[in-house]
């Protein structure tokens, strides 16, 4: 290690930027977040530097650099574009012991700027000694995805509770264990999910009784199947979970994202065949959370679109437990994107109807009422087995028999299967298509899919051959 990573306090201290181009402007954006008193020396400053001077955020000197400009500075950045001038600034600054950074000039710099992940007051700095700044930025991008957006809020929460903890807990080892419970576990989950009042109540309870009653529950949408479509928040929930209750339709590559030592409990459902009744799932979530575990309920697609997520939220709330909702990309959105079908389109559909082929306890499509025809796209979940009934109901509701339809099985996954054709042919297409989880999309937007010509033509030829 040739460089010592340090954090330099600049609040209300003098900082100098020499130069007015894009590189200097980038340094200005960074320094403004430190609370430094900033001076910029530039004959031709950028519009952003000009604007900062107008609002008195900085002092702007429209002239050439002078040697006495170094006096009283806590740090100097030089980005003049003039190699000789940059070298002179570097030499003079180091002669008087002022830290100096020459942009794109590591050999002239007394310190190097790292790539920064900012979750103020939590800062992560990544450096490569100037050898590969592009690699440092790539590492930063990965860390940005991993670290919660409210990590800084958690740091401030812990800071706020330090004195109350010291006042109640005299033993240093015990005090450290209490603060560890603030930094990871149910209390931290509350802070990271924006439930600050509940976090304060749990912290007060921990100091009073030495325990926190119950864990937490996160209702997580797993998306349509492609693990790369998981949200960052969903990935963090899976990596923190103590126990995960998952549905049958959640793809194996998504289950692979669960923390290795977390308990996995299948509570699969398919049509009216439920391995665990819905009421039983609610009880399992509550029991696990009451045992102090971080619970994840992992559901395919989005929990609130035909996922019965509302019933599970009600069960958790009734037990007085905290719950976080993490939405997922729904099957309709995922399948439409993977088949290039725009669900809405100015020339074809100004409305989108989401329907299910099976209601409560397997009640078929017709009881929900078929959507009326005209200027809309209809997406039907779990409709494959009800294709005959759906076709009849839609035609009776005014949909033309030549309305385009698409059947998308395992949408977004490597084994995705697509069939397209006309509404009148939907029952036959369903029989030929397969038996996996399939979404139906009905409307003229289906003609815009790249699959339309291929599968629709193949289906027509197949029908002619059968005749």
Image (spheres, rainbow, N blue to C red):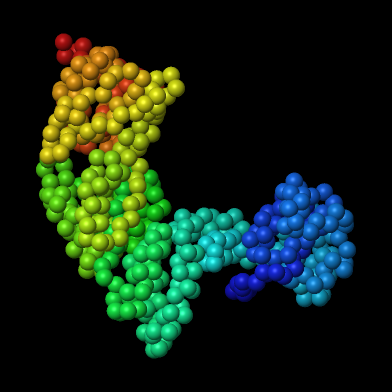
Q: Residue, x 22% and y 20% (percent of image)?
A: 394
Establish if 77 lies above or below 232.
below
Q: Nearer the viewer, residue 179 or 208?
A: 208
Establish if 259 lies above or below 207.
above
Q: Nearer the viewer, residue 181 or 65?
A: 181
Residue 54 seen: yes
**Placement of the C terminus among the 4 image quadrants:** top left
Q: Position of residue 280 (x, y in %)?
A: 14, 54
Quadrant assignment, res 262? bottom left
Q: Position of residue 112 (x, y in %)?
A: 67, 66
Q: Residue furthest bottom?
A: 171
Q: Residue, x 25% and y 52% (percent of image)?
A: 313
Q: Nearer the viewer, residue 13 or 420?
A: 13
Q: Position of residue 18 (x, y in %)?
A: 79, 59
- Count the labels in the image: 0
Q: Position of residue 183 (x, y in %)?
A: 41, 71
Q: Residue, x 29% and y 32% (percent of image)?
A: 354
**Placement of the N terminus among the 4 image quadrants:** bottom right
Q: Is residue 100 left or right of residue 152?
A: right
Residue 246 seen: no
């Amino acid at each position: 290690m040739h460089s010592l990573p340090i954090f330099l306090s600049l609040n209300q201290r003098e900082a100098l930027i020499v130069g007015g181009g894009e590189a200097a402007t980038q340094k200005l954006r960074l320094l403004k977040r430190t609370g430094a008193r900033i001076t910029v020396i530039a004959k031709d400053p950028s519009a952003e530097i000009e604007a900062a001077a107008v609002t008195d955020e900085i002092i702007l000197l429209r002239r050439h650099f002078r040697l006495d400009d170094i006096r009283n500075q806590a740090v100097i950045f030089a980005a003049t574009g003039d190699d000789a001038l940059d070298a002179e600034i570097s030499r003079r600054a180091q002669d008087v012991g002022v830290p100096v950074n020459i942009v794109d000039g590591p050999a002239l710099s007394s310190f190097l700027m790292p790539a920064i992940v900012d979750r103020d007051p939590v800062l992560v700095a990544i450096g490569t000694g100037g050898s590969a700044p592009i690699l440092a930025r790539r590492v930063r991008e990965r860390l940005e995805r991993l670290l919660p957006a409210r990590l800084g809020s958690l740091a401030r929460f812990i800071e706020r509770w330090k004195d109350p903890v010291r006042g109640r807990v005299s033993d240093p080892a015990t005090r450290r264990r209490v603060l560890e419970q603030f930094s990871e576990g149910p209390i931290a989950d509350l802070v990271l999910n924006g439930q600050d009042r509940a976090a304060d109540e749990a912290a007060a309870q921990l100091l009073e009784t030495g325990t926190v009653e119950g864990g937490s529950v996160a209702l997580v949408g797993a998306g349509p199947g492609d693990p790369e479509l998981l949200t960052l928040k969903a990935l963090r929930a899976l990596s923190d979970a103590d126990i995960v209750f998952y549905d049958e339709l959640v793809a194996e590559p998504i289950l692979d994202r669960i923390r290795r030592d977390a308990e996995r409990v299948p509570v699969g459902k398919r049509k009216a065949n439920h391995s665990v009744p819905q009421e039983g799932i609610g009880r399992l979530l509550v029991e696990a959370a009451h045992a102090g575990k971080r619970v994840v309920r992992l559901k395919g697609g989005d929990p609130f679109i035909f996922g019965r997520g509302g019933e599970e939220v009600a069960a958790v709330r009734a037990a007085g437990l905290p719950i976080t909702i993490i939405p997922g990309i729904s099957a309709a959105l995922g399948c439409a994107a993977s088949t290039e079908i725009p669900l809405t389109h100015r020339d074809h559909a100004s409305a989108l109807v989401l329907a299910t082929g099976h209601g409560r306890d397997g009640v078929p499509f017709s009881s929900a009422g078929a959507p009326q025809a005209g200027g809309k796209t209809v997406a039907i979940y779990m409709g494959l087995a009800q294709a005959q009934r759906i076709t009849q109901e839609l035609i009776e509701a005014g949909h033309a028999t030549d309305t385009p339809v698409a059947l998308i099985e395992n949408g977004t996954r490597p084994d995705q299967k697509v069939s397209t054709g006309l509404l009148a042919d939907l029952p036959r297409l369903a029989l030929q298509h397969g038996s996996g989880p399939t979404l139906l999309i009905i409307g003229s937007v289906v003609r815009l899919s790249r699959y339309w010509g291929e599968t629709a033509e193949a289906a027509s030829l197949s029908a002619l051959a059968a005749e």
